[in-house]
Image (spheres, rainbow, N blue to C red):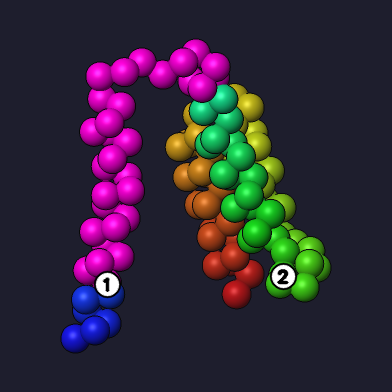
Amino acid sequence: MSQFLAIVLAGIGTYLSRAIFIIALADRQFPPLALRALEYVGPAVMGALIVSMLTTAEGQVLIGLPEVAGLTCAALVAWKTRNHIYTLLTGMAVFWGVAALLV
Protein backbone atom coordinates (compact mmCIF):
# COMPACT_ATOMS: atom_id res chain seq x y z
CA MET A 1 0.00 0.00 0.00
CA SER A 2 2.87 2.39 0.69
CA GLN A 3 4.13 2.09 -2.91
CA PHE A 4 0.68 2.98 -4.23
CA LEU A 5 0.51 5.95 -1.87
CA ALA A 6 3.96 7.11 -3.02
CA ILE A 7 2.90 6.92 -6.67
CA VAL A 8 -0.32 8.84 -5.98
CA LEU A 9 1.50 11.54 -3.98
CA ALA A 10 4.17 11.87 -6.67
CA GLY A 11 1.45 12.27 -9.29
CA ILE A 12 -0.38 14.90 -7.27
CA GLY A 13 2.88 16.76 -6.59
CA THR A 14 3.81 16.72 -10.27
CA TYR A 15 0.37 17.92 -11.29
CA LEU A 16 0.37 20.74 -8.74
CA SER A 17 3.90 21.87 -9.62
CA ARG A 18 2.83 22.28 -13.25
CA ALA A 19 -0.68 23.62 -12.64
CA ILE A 20 0.39 26.32 -10.21
CA PHE A 21 2.10 28.28 -12.98
CA ILE A 22 -0.95 28.06 -15.22
CA ILE A 23 -3.26 29.18 -12.42
CA ALA A 24 -0.98 31.89 -11.04
CA LEU A 25 0.06 33.37 -14.40
CA ALA A 26 -3.18 32.97 -16.37
CA ASP A 27 -4.01 36.68 -16.44
CA ARG A 28 -0.47 37.98 -16.91
CA GLN A 29 1.65 38.62 -19.99
CA PHE A 30 5.12 37.13 -20.27
CA PRO A 31 7.90 39.68 -20.74
CA PRO A 32 9.24 39.75 -24.32
CA LEU A 33 12.70 38.76 -23.09
CA ALA A 34 11.31 35.63 -21.44
CA LEU A 35 9.38 34.69 -24.59
CA ARG A 36 12.52 35.18 -26.65
CA ALA A 37 14.51 32.95 -24.32
CA LEU A 38 11.80 30.25 -24.38
CA GLU A 39 12.25 29.92 -28.15
CA TYR A 40 15.54 28.14 -27.46
CA VAL A 41 14.16 25.55 -25.03
CA GLY A 42 13.15 23.07 -27.76
CA PRO A 43 16.53 23.04 -29.55
CA ALA A 44 18.37 22.88 -26.22
CA VAL A 45 16.34 19.88 -25.05
CA MET A 46 16.83 18.14 -28.40
CA GLY A 47 20.58 18.75 -28.18
CA ALA A 48 20.68 17.36 -24.64
CA LEU A 49 18.75 14.26 -25.72
CA ILE A 50 21.12 13.68 -28.63
CA VAL A 51 24.23 14.04 -26.49
CA SER A 52 22.85 11.72 -23.81
CA MET A 53 21.96 9.15 -26.48
CA LEU A 54 25.44 9.23 -28.00
CA THR A 55 27.51 8.94 -24.81
CA THR A 56 27.99 6.22 -22.23
CA ALA A 57 28.10 6.68 -18.46
CA GLU A 58 31.89 6.78 -18.69
CA GLY A 59 31.80 9.62 -21.23
CA GLN A 60 32.72 7.62 -24.31
CA VAL A 61 31.07 8.55 -27.58
CA LEU A 62 29.17 5.74 -29.29
CA ILE A 63 28.09 6.61 -32.79
CA GLY A 64 27.23 4.28 -35.63
CA LEU A 65 25.44 4.32 -38.94
CA PRO A 66 21.90 4.60 -37.47
CA GLU A 67 22.88 7.63 -35.39
CA VAL A 68 24.65 9.37 -38.27
CA ALA A 69 21.76 8.69 -40.67
CA GLY A 70 19.14 9.89 -38.17
CA LEU A 71 21.05 13.04 -37.24
CA THR A 72 21.78 13.88 -40.87
CA CYS A 73 18.17 13.51 -41.95
CA ALA A 74 16.93 15.40 -38.90
CA ALA A 75 19.37 18.24 -39.61
CA LEU A 76 18.17 18.48 -43.20
CA VAL A 77 14.52 18.55 -42.16
CA ALA A 78 15.24 21.15 -39.46
CA TRP A 79 17.08 23.31 -41.98
CA LYS A 80 14.32 23.08 -44.59
CA THR A 81 11.17 23.21 -42.44
CA ARG A 82 12.24 24.87 -39.17
CA ASN A 83 9.70 22.57 -37.48
CA HIS A 84 10.73 20.71 -34.31
CA ILE A 85 8.07 18.04 -34.63
CA TYR A 86 8.97 17.11 -38.21
CA THR A 87 12.64 17.12 -37.26
CA LEU A 88 12.09 14.80 -34.32
CA LEU A 89 9.81 12.42 -36.21
CA THR A 90 12.14 12.21 -39.21
CA GLY A 91 15.23 11.64 -37.11
CA MET A 92 13.54 8.94 -35.05
CA ALA A 93 12.08 7.17 -38.09
CA VAL A 94 15.39 7.12 -39.95
CA PHE A 95 17.31 6.02 -36.85
CA TRP A 96 14.91 3.16 -36.10
CA GLY A 97 14.66 2.18 -39.76
CA VAL A 98 18.41 1.96 -40.31
CA ALA A 99 18.88 0.19 -36.96
CA ALA A 100 16.22 -2.39 -37.92
CA LEU A 101 17.86 -2.98 -41.29
CA LEU A 102 21.26 -3.62 -39.68
CA VAL A 103 20.00 -6.24 -37.22
Q: Amino acid at mark 1?
A: Ile
Please give the name of the residue rendered at 54% of the width and 35% of the height, measured from the top-left corner: 41
User: Extreme left residue here?
Assistant: 1
Toward the viewer: 65 or 48?
48
Q: Above or below — where is 99 with respect to 67?
A: below
The residue segment tinted magenta is: 7-36
User: Extreme front residue here?
Assistant: 24
Q: Residue 79 location in percent, x, y?
A: 63, 27
Magenta highlight on residue 70: no
Q: Above or below — where is 59 with respect to 27?
A: below
- Please name the residue that numbered disc 1 is placed on: 7
Q: Which mark is residue 56?
A: 2
Is there any visible trace of residue 63 in the rendered image? yes
Q: Residue 10 location in percent, x, y?
A: 30, 65
Relative horizontal placement of residue 77, taking residue 7 as reference (left or right)? right
Please give the name of the residue rendered at 51% of the width and 43% of the height, measured from the top-left corner: 88
Q: Above or below — where is 53 with respect to 45?
A: below
For marks 1 and 2, give the CA distance.
30 Å
Q: Residue 40 location in percent, x, y?
A: 58, 30
- Report which quarter residue 82 is drawn in: top right
Please give the name of the residue rendered at 32% of the width and 55% of the height, measured from the top-left corner: 14
User: Extreme bottom residue here?
Assistant: 1
Q: Which SS class for mark 1?
A: helix
Q: Above or below — where is 57 with respect to 98?
A: below
* Labels 1 and 2 touching (C-beta < 8 A): no
